[in-house]
Amino acid sequence: MPLTKTSMSEDEKEAPLDPAAERLQRRLTRLVRISGVTMAAGLIAVFSAILYRTVNRPSTAHTGAPLDIAVPAPSGATILSSNTSGDLLTMVVDAPEGRMAIVVDLRNGSVVARARLVTQPGT
């Protein structure tokens, strides 16, 4: 005797669903369709964002042209240290009026910030 049936006899056919079960089946079918469309829209949004960020990424490569910028510093100042981070240059200088940090934007040579370093008494 085979384990699978190839056809249903007249006695074994499904009985029609009652109206409440049909409504429930329609609601579940509609819910599955809505969730499928929502998931597809979400996937499309995620992949479009990835594609947009990949294509429109700003170039961070250096053009190779030498930089020629003048950074205004107090007269008699000595550079103690410098550090670059992206397009910013930070310098710690020892000036006659005290130590200060100068932050310069390397794209246009403008001074972004200037901070005087002071010591606190008792520390």
Image: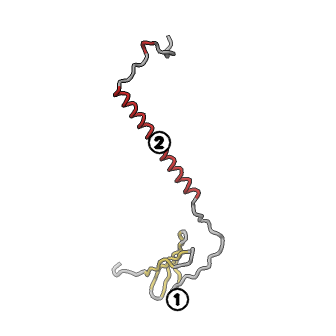
The amino acid at mark 1 is Gly
Task: Pinpoint residue 46: horizontal percent, then vertical percent.
Answer: 50, 50
Q: Residue at x 40, y 81 (%)?
A: 118
Q: Secondary structure at mark 2?
A: helix
> Tag 2 or tag 1, which sits nearer the N-term?
2
Instruction: Answer with left or right where residue 24 lies relative to residue 88.
Output: left
**From what the image shows, is residue 70 above or below residue 27?**
below
Q: Which residue is outermost to the top?
A: 1
Q: Residues within 10 Å of mark 1 (few under 14, many from 20)?
A: few
**From what the image shows, is residue 46 above or below residue 97?**
above
Q: Residue at x 40, y 32 (%)?
A: 26
Which dot, 1 or 2, sits closer to the camera? 2
* Residue that mark 2 sits on: 37
Asked whether 79 or 25 is in front, the reply is 25
| The quadrant where residue 122 appears | bottom left
* Residue that mark 1 sits on: 76
The amino acid at mark 2 is Val
Q: Residue at x 49, y 79 (%)?
A: 102
